[in-house]
Amino acid sequence: MNGPLSNIRLGTPRLVIREFVPGDLKGLQDYAGRPEVVRFLTWGPNRPAQTRGFLGNVAVRREMRPRNDFELAVTHREEGGLIGHCCLWHKDREQGEAEIGYCLNPRYRGLGLAEEAVRRLTRFGFTDLGLHRIWATCDPLNLPSKRLLKRVGFRREGFLKKHLLIHGRWRDSYLYAILKDEWRRGR
Amino acid sequence: MPSVSLPIIIPDMKPIALSNIRIETPRLVLREFHPSDWRDVSAYSKLRRVVRFLPWGPDSPKQTRDFLRDMARERRRKVRRSFEMAVVLRETGRVIGGCGLRIKNAAQRESDLGYVLHPRYWNLGYTTEAARAMVRFGFKTLKLHRIWSTHDPGNGSSGRVMRKIGMRQEGFLRKDILQKGRWRDSALYAILETDRHSR
């Protein structure tokens, strides 16, 4: 990892995952405002003011010590623009455990870019943060997300009934997790 | 029916200003911990067989006093997230265990449930009585949507308590808790506000 925990920069062949900057507003709003993108997410569709609020909030939490929230911009290495974001929430330090989430601009779907980002974020969690376990939830109807988690090596551990309030309705979630050993073996 | 001293409706789950909770059941009273409870609490928190399946303990008297001090501090917080109650046996007035809810995700109105009991009182239904009252408090007063709990797969009695109070198993988490220096698995149970048992 380059630099301190307040300035994360993670590279992959096609992506650079980095801290958000105010200039990301446009690129973020480009997908955060679309209902089809946030269909399975607890937030959105965002008005520009909400996206601006999110960026302000992220900037504040980024400076917290210890830093528990890593909300990062996913940018295209060649094109340079923001194409999505991914998050790692380090909730329970003592238990060496974190939750991850991700969202991609649909224009870049189907290219394996979200998977590339999640793999890199997972590696960051295990090697740089020293995590022991990383988990994620996804809506049972969200096929691409389920497939992605499986490919990265996450295993399904549970079915949470009416787990999240999503656009006014309580929805079920699948719970997935990967352990450090499994991740090491899978590489 | 449990009675609560300060029933406050919290529609958006933000500030929870409940600082003096008291819940009554036929045989038990669930009330706030006091620093003077340390002898009663230490009587069980120091026992290896009590904490065998828990991530903490066995506690020294000092650790028990620190715990009670933390609980007193938590009560005074403007936004209270932790509701750890002393379980008092009505008959004797002594603290025989603890039972609590910790709000993990306020936006999603979600908390976990935990309990511990002095072994002298095991197998008499006290844990079930306390846990059931706590769950009802969570749904009725705290307006929670979902309460979950986990137990060590080797701790069958804890799983039985969860099933008796109407929780359902939703998952099996691999190596999710560091317990006595080892990663242990957890059985995950949950109950929803809409479940029959939650009323």
Image (cartoon, rainbow, N blue to C red):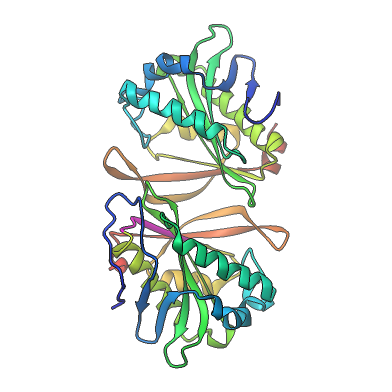
Position in image of residue A63 (x %, y %) = 57, 33
Seen from the viewer's position, the closer of residues B10 and B75 is B75
Left or right, residue A171 beside residue B75 = left
Seen from the viewer's position, the closer of residues B133 and B94 is B94
> Relative to residue B88, is residue A33 depicted above or below?
above
Q: Residue furthest bottom?
A: B91
**Residue drawn where x is 64% and y is 19% of the image:** A12
**Residue drawn where x is 34% and y is 57% of the image:** B144
Position in image of residue A109 (x %, y %) = 45, 18
> Relative to residue A38, is residue B43 depicted above or below?
below
> Relative to residue A186, is residue B166 depicted above or below?
below
Q: In this figure, what is the number of numbered marks?
A: 0
What quarter of the picture does the C terminus of chain B occupy? bottom left
Q: Quadrant of residue A174?
A: top left
Position in image of residue B114 (x %, y %) = 50, 67
Left or right, residue B180 beside residue B8 = right
Seen from the viewer's position, the closer of residues A7 and B99 is A7
Q: Which residue range is magenta in the image?
A: B143-149
What quarter of the picture does the N terminus of chain B occupy? bottom left
**Residue drawn where x is 47% and y is 71% of the image:** B99
Seen from the viewer's position, the closer of residues A89 and A143 is A89
Specify whether residue A40 is painted magenta. Answer: no
Position in image of residue A18 (x %, y %) = 58, 21
Whether residue B54 is visible, yes or no, is yes
Specify whether residue B147 is painted magenta. Answer: yes
Q: Quadrant of residue A78?
A: top right
Left or right, residue A129 beside residue B41 = right
Whether residue B59 is visible, yes or no, is no
